[in-house]
Image (tube, rainbow, N blue to C red):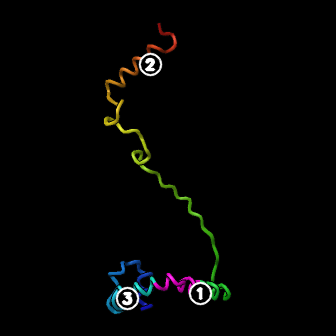
Amino acid sequence: MVNGVLWRLRTGAPWRDLPERYGPWQTVYERFARWEADGTWAKLLEHVQVHDDAGGRVEWIVAVDSTINRAHQHAAGARKRGTQAGTNRKIRAARRRIRHSVGPGAG
């Protein structure tokens, strides 16, 4: 069973794709979920980290990723054309005429 859990964690495959040699995937998943809930996995990880750190086999390196993902302009809340009130071509033209007639030097 533990080998099935480790296989699944190593490969990242869905639980349903667990090879038959590990037993029914539902049983393996239930054991994994039970051990996650009761803290068994956290204890195992802590034990391995402490053991390997004491032996000098762990190199504690901190890495910061400064990757930037930009959204497309349509995802960023850009104004939509045509469907919103006040965006009609004739209305925009009328607004431009009004702005020019009340600007500096008018009248």
Is 41 magenta? The answer is yes
Residue 43 appears at what percent x and percent y?
58, 85
- Between marks 2 and 3, how big is the CA–CA gap? 73 Å
Find numbered disc 3 in the image and state the secondary structure of the residue it sits on: helix
Q: Give the vertical position of 3 relative to 78 (above or below).
A: below
Q: Which one is in front, 63 or 39? A: 39
- Between marks 2 and 1, how big is the CA–CA gap? 72 Å
Q: What range is drawn magenta here?
A: 34-45
> Three-letter amino acid code at disc 1?
Val
Along the horizontal axis of the image, is 6 left or right of 62? left
Q: Residue at x 47, y 51 (%)?
A: 70
Mark nearest the camera among 2 and 1 is 2
Mark sitting on residue 48? 1
Mark 2 or mark 1, earlier in chain? 1
Q: Residues within 10 Å of mark 2 (few under 14, many from 20)?
A: few
Residue designated by label 2: 99
- Between marks 3 and 1, how big is the CA–CA gap? 25 Å
Mark 3 or mark 1, earlier in chain? 3
Residue designated by label 3: 27
Mark 2 or mark 3, earlier in chain? 3
> Three-letter amino acid code at disc 2?
Arg
Q: Residues within 10 Å of mark 3 (few under 14, many from 20)?
A: few
